[in-house]
Image (tube, grey):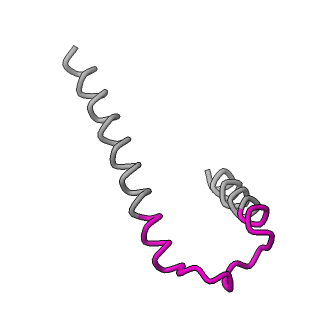
Amino acid sequence: MNKQITRLVEHRLEFGAKKYGKENMTSDGRDFIEESLEEILDGMIYIAGRIIELKEQNNDKIKE
């Protein structure tokens, strides 16, 4: 699993380098603290929704 996580991180870094034309984005003017908070909150919403879906599917299977 660690190798899969490493590959995902590497792909995101490559994506960012292609999108922004450089690897180090610390000086592009964005507020990385605010952007990080927004991204983390979005991720929490997505994963919570998916967990709820999976729990509902499991409960439906148990009831059958």
Residue 29, compared with residue 56, is above or below; it is below
Q: How many marks?
A: 0
Q: Nearer the viewer, residue 21 or 4?
A: 21
Q: Nearer the viewer, residue 23 or 47?
A: 23
- Please tell me which residue is depicted at 43% across the width and 67% down the height of the picture: 38
Locate residue 6 relative to residue 21 in the image: left or right: left
Residue 35: image x %, image y %?
50, 72
Residue 50: image x %, image y %?
38, 41
Locate residue 59 relative to residue 31 in the image: left or right: left
- Please tell me which residue is depicted at 31% across the width and 27% down the height of the picture: 57
Residue 53, compared with residue 27, is above or below; it is above
What's drawn in magenta, residue-wise? 16-40
Residue 47: image x %, image y %?
40, 49
- Please tell me which residue is depicted at 74% across the width and 79% down the height of the picture: 24
User: Which quarter of the image is occupied by the C terminus?
Assistant: top left
Determine the residue located farthest toward the left in the rendered image: 63
Locate residue 26 relative to residue 18 in the image: left or right: left
Determine the residue located farthest toward the top in the rendered image: 64
Locate residue 31 relative to residue 49 in the image: left or right: right
Residue 61, compared with residue 40, is above or below; it is above
Q: Nearer the viewer, residue 46 or 5?
A: 46
Q: Quadrant of residue 25?
A: bottom right
Residue 40: image x %, image y %?
44, 65
Q: Quadrant of residue 28?
A: bottom right
Reply yes or no: does residue 14 show up in magenta. Answer: no
- Please tell me which residue is depicted at 26% across the width and 31% down the height of the picture: 56
